[in-house]
Image (spheres, rainbow, N blue to C red):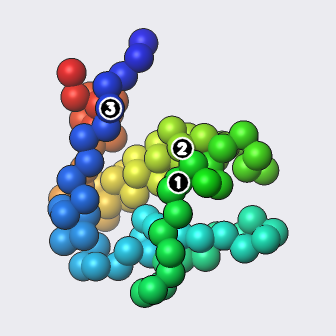
Amino acid sequence: MKHSTVVFPHWKHQEVLKGNCGECHHSRTADWKQVPYKEGMKIQECKTCHNKNHPNKKLNSVKKAMHTNCKGCHKEMKKAGKKTGPTKCTGCHKK
Protein backbone atom coordinates (compact mmCIF):
# COMPACT_ATOMS: atom_id res chain seq x y z
CA MET A 1 0.00 0.00 0.00
CA LYS A 2 1.40 3.39 -0.97
CA HIS A 3 1.14 6.04 1.73
CA SER A 4 0.68 9.76 1.22
CA THR A 5 3.37 12.38 1.68
CA VAL A 6 4.27 12.94 5.32
CA VAL A 7 2.73 15.87 7.15
CA PHE A 8 5.60 17.37 9.15
CA PRO A 9 5.13 20.39 11.43
CA HIS A 10 8.74 21.62 11.62
CA TRP A 11 7.85 24.50 13.94
CA LYS A 12 6.33 22.11 16.46
CA HIS A 13 9.50 20.01 16.58
CA GLN A 14 11.63 23.14 17.02
CA GLU A 15 9.39 24.16 19.91
CA VAL A 16 9.45 20.75 21.65
CA LEU A 17 13.20 20.31 21.16
CA LYS A 18 13.85 23.90 22.24
CA GLY A 19 15.89 24.67 19.13
CA ASN A 20 18.20 21.65 19.53
CA CYS A 21 18.45 20.96 15.78
CA GLY A 22 21.01 18.19 16.39
CA GLU A 23 18.26 15.92 17.69
CA CYS A 24 17.12 15.39 14.09
CA HIS A 25 19.71 16.98 11.81
CA HIS A 26 23.21 15.59 11.60
CA SER A 27 26.19 15.20 9.36
CA ARG A 28 28.60 12.33 8.93
CA THR A 29 32.30 11.77 8.90
CA ALA A 30 34.18 9.98 6.11
CA ASP A 31 33.87 6.69 8.03
CA TRP A 32 30.05 7.09 8.32
CA LYS A 33 29.96 8.12 11.98
CA GLN A 34 27.06 10.44 12.75
CA VAL A 35 27.88 13.95 13.98
CA PRO A 36 25.06 16.04 15.53
CA TYR A 37 24.30 19.37 13.89
CA LYS A 38 26.10 22.36 15.35
CA GLU A 39 25.18 25.99 14.70
CA GLY A 40 26.47 27.10 11.30
CA MET A 41 26.81 23.64 9.73
CA LYS A 42 25.30 23.18 6.30
CA ILE A 43 22.21 20.99 6.49
CA GLN A 44 22.26 18.47 3.65
CA GLU A 45 19.22 16.77 2.18
CA CYS A 46 18.61 13.44 3.91
CA LYS A 47 19.04 11.54 0.65
CA THR A 48 22.64 12.80 0.42
CA CYS A 49 23.59 9.99 2.83
CA HIS A 50 20.43 7.93 3.28
CA ASN A 51 20.54 6.10 -0.03
CA LYS A 52 21.63 2.70 -1.38
CA ASN A 53 25.29 3.55 -0.63
CA HIS A 54 24.69 3.81 3.11
CA PRO A 55 26.49 0.89 4.83
CA ASN A 56 23.66 0.28 7.31
CA LYS A 57 20.80 -1.48 5.52
CA LYS A 58 18.37 -0.19 8.16
CA LEU A 59 19.24 3.39 7.14
CA ASN A 60 19.85 3.05 3.39
CA SER A 61 16.82 5.08 2.33
CA VAL A 62 15.19 8.27 3.56
CA LYS A 63 12.06 6.28 4.42
CA LYS A 64 14.00 3.84 6.61
CA ALA A 65 15.93 6.66 8.30
CA MET A 66 12.76 8.61 9.07
CA HIS A 67 10.95 5.55 10.38
CA THR A 68 13.92 4.76 12.63
CA ASN A 69 14.56 8.30 13.87
CA CYS A 70 11.06 9.78 14.04
CA LYS A 71 9.11 6.78 15.28
CA GLY A 72 11.93 5.89 17.64
CA CYS A 73 11.92 9.36 19.20
CA HIS A 74 8.13 9.37 19.54
CA LYS A 75 8.19 5.95 21.23
CA GLU A 76 10.95 7.07 23.65
CA MET A 77 8.96 10.18 24.57
CA LYS A 78 5.86 8.07 25.20
CA LYS A 79 7.86 5.71 27.45
CA ALA A 80 9.05 8.74 29.42
CA GLY A 81 5.45 9.83 29.92
CA LYS A 82 5.78 12.90 27.71
CA LYS A 83 3.33 14.17 25.14
CA THR A 84 4.47 12.70 21.85
CA GLY A 85 3.86 12.43 18.14
CA PRO A 86 2.38 9.58 16.14
CA THR A 87 3.86 6.10 15.79
CA LYS A 88 1.26 4.60 13.44
CA CYS A 89 1.27 5.08 9.65
CA THR A 90 -1.80 7.29 9.42
CA GLY A 91 -0.44 9.61 12.11
CA CYS A 92 2.14 10.99 9.67
CA HIS A 93 0.74 9.84 6.32
CA LYS A 94 -2.64 11.56 6.16
CA LYS A 95 -5.27 10.18 3.78
Q: Is residue 82 visible?
A: no
Quote the CA–CA distance across marks 3 and 1. Answer: 15 Å
Q: Residue at x 21, y 53 (%)?
A: 9
Which quadrant of the structure image shows residue 77?
bottom left
Q: Is residue 73 left or right of residue 26?
A: left
Q: Is residue 64 above or below residue 89?
A: below
Q: Residue at x 61, y 76 (%)?
A: 35
| Upstream in sequence: badge 3 or badge 1 | 3
Few, some or many C-alpha atoms within 10 Å of disc 2 (few <14, some 14-19, many ≥20)? some
Q: Residue at x 47, y 43 (%)?
A: 67
Q: Is residue 88 visible?
A: yes
Few, some or many C-alpha atoms within 10 Å of disc 1 (few <14, some 14-19, many ≥20)? some
Few, some or many C-alpha atoms within 10 Å of disc 3 (few <14, some 14-19, many ≥20)? few
Q: Provide residue 89's location: percent of width, then percent of height.
A: 33, 30
Circles 3 and 1 in contact, beta carbons < 8 Å: no
Q: Is residue 31 above or below residue 7?
A: below
Q: Is residue 39 left or right of residue 63?
A: left
Is 46 in front, or is 78?
A: 46
Q: Which residue is mark 1?
A: 46
Q: Residue at x 40, y 57 (%)?
A: 73
Quote the CA–CA distance across marks 2 and 3. Answer: 13 Å
Q: Which residue is mark 3?
A: 5
Q: Amino acid at mark 1?
A: Cys
Q: Which mark is residue 62?
A: 2
Say what secondary structure mark 2 lies in: helix
Q: Is residue 19 above or below residue 49?
A: below
Residue occupying the far bottom of the picture = 39
In the rendered view of the protein, which quadrant contains the C terminus?
top left
In the rendered view of the protein, which quadrant contains the N terminus?
top left
